[in-house]
């Protein structure tokens, strides 16, 4: 099957079957493509998902009637063709002819005339269609209305900047392994290989690459010299700041980026990495192995203390809580399609349950760092405010930082601020 048809089927699985982009790209059909073709499919699928709302609005202008459910692969093919014309600047004739040809690869030759007609009509009426479509806010920003409304309510002065930043291509951010090299040494190695890079000011060991590349092209990636991690996520280990020999829990550890950063920065701690997904915990093992680090790794639900806790309290706990991930849409644009309004209340309940359970295993005088990659107050400062009402021995520790903005409790980074993902942190101390 031609690459473009494979991309249309992949997009269909995300858009209409509820799979994530990550799941789709693990599919055997894509794994069998060449490296170059895989990269192309990833690019156009990410782009079409990122601009799903706008592309959908354009199609509604161009189609006389909606495409029926059994032919959503053809609709996705049209989305890819439009994405190429608008965002990739693919030559018009190539975008049209190759998209038409792909309808045959999908074994729907009848759709060739439809695809040809729709794309050629767009080319004729492009300026008019785009001007009309961009009057519709959900198309202009390509955000679902329910989420746009929540962001506006939470950030009335910043909602447009948040949505614009969330639609941009994210930078490739790295974390140097301080056990093996200084940031300056690794920057020099990149320079020797003619890879453009610059230090991230808001981090100790972060590096930003203006041009993304495969991790296999990074010097000594396989040997553990560097990891991919956004600058916002790199703040966690610094904030938790355990001392040597302390017992530390990473309660929702997968895929293990913060686990490994803690061990790189504080190699003498005793760390337990916990996650409720046996599938995702494999990534923790893989990261620990590549970086030559050691931790006690357990698969269990952190709320179910009887399933995993040995009775020894922890001096430090990192709770990187399950959340809406609304702060990392630029890296995971499928969140806009997969997340539902009703998910937020469910996630709030999970977060509250985790806070209540883990507070029991925190030693008196110990610190719990609550983190999310959300920008919604219900999951962040409002969640912590509610927790504080139930725990008289919980004290808020002020976070003094040059990044983010101070809230009623904790600090919030909005997407794109200082080049970072959207993230929230609150640091709590258990009174002795």
Image (spheres, rainbow, N blue to C red):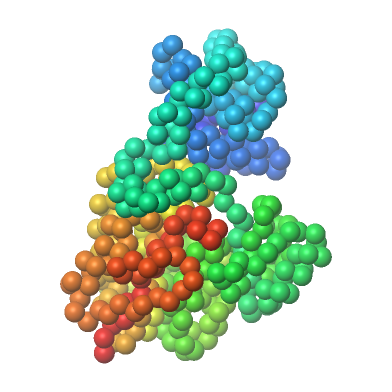
Residue 256 placed where, x, y %? Answer: 50, 66
Residue at 41%, 17% in the rendered image? 66
Viewer can see residue 320: no
Residue 44 location in percent, x, y? 59, 35
Q: In the figure, residue 172 lies in which quadrant?
A: bottom right
Front one among 80 and 402 = 402
Q: Residue at x 66, y 42 (%)?
A: 39
- Asked whether 265 or 37 is in front, the reply is 265
User: Percent position (x, y) of residue 113?
Assistant: 58, 9
Above or below residue 393? Residue 287 is: above
Tell me if residue 170 comes above or below residue 394 in the rendering: above
The number of callouts visible is 0
Q: If the image is split into quadrants, where does the C terminus sit?
A: bottom left
Residue positioned 68% across, 64% down in the render: 198
Q: Is residue 83 visible?
A: yes
In this picture, is 137 found above or below 356?
above
| Residue 28 relative to residue 388: left or right | right
């Amino acid at each position: 099957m031609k690459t473009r048809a494979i991309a249309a089927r992949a997009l269909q699985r995300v858009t209409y079957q509820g799979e994530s982009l990550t799941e789709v790209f693990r599919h055997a059909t894509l794994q069998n493509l060449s490296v170059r073709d895989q990269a192309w499919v990833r690019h156009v699928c990410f782009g079409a998902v990122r601009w799903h709302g706008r592309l959908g609005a354009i199609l509604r202008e161009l189609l006389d009637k909606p495409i029926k459910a059994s032919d959503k692969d053809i609709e996705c093919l049209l989305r890819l063709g439009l994405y190429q014309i608008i965002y990739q600047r693919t030559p018009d004739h190539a975008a049209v002819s190759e998209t038409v040809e792909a309808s045959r690869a999908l074994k729907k030759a009848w759709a060739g005339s439809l695809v040809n007609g729709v794309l050629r009509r767009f080319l004729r009426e492009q300026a008019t269609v785009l001007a009309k479509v961009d009057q519709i806010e959900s198309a202009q920003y390509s955000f679902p209305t329910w989420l746009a409304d929540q962001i506006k309510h939470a950030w009335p002065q910043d909602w447009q900047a948040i949505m614009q930043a969330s639609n941009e291509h994210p930078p490739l951010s790295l974390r140097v392994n301080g056990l093996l090299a200084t940031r300056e040494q690794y920057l020099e190695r990149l320079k020797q290989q003619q890879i453009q890079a610059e230090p991230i000011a808001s981090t100790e060991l972060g590096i930003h690459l203006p041009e993304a590349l495969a991790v296999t092209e990074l010097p000594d990636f396989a040997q553990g010299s560097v990891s991919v991690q956004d600058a916002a996520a790199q703040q966690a280990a610094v904030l938790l700041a355990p001392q040597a020999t302390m017992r530390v829990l990473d309660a929702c550890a997968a895929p293990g980026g913060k686990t490994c950063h803690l061990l790189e920065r504080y190699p003498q701690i005793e760390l337990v990495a916990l996650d409720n997904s046996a599938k995702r915990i494999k990534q923790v093992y893989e990261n620990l192995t590549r970086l030559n680090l050691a931790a006690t790794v357990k698969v269990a639900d952190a709320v179910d203390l009887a399933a995993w806790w040995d009775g020894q309290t922890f001096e430090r706990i990192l709770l990187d809580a399950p959340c809406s991930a609304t702060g990392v849409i630029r890296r995971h644009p499928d969140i806009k399609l997969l997340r539902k309004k009703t998910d937020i209340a469910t996630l709030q309940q999970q977060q509250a349950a985790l806070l209540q359970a883990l507070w029991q295993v925190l030693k008196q005088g110990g610190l719990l760092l609550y983190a999310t990659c959300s920008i919604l107050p219900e999951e962040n400062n409002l969640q912590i405010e509610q927790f504080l009402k139930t725990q008289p021995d919980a004290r808020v520790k002020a976070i003094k930082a040059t990044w983010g903005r101070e809230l009623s409790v904790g600090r919030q980074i909005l997407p794109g601020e200082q080049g970072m993902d959207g993230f929230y942190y609150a640091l709590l101390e258990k009174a002795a």
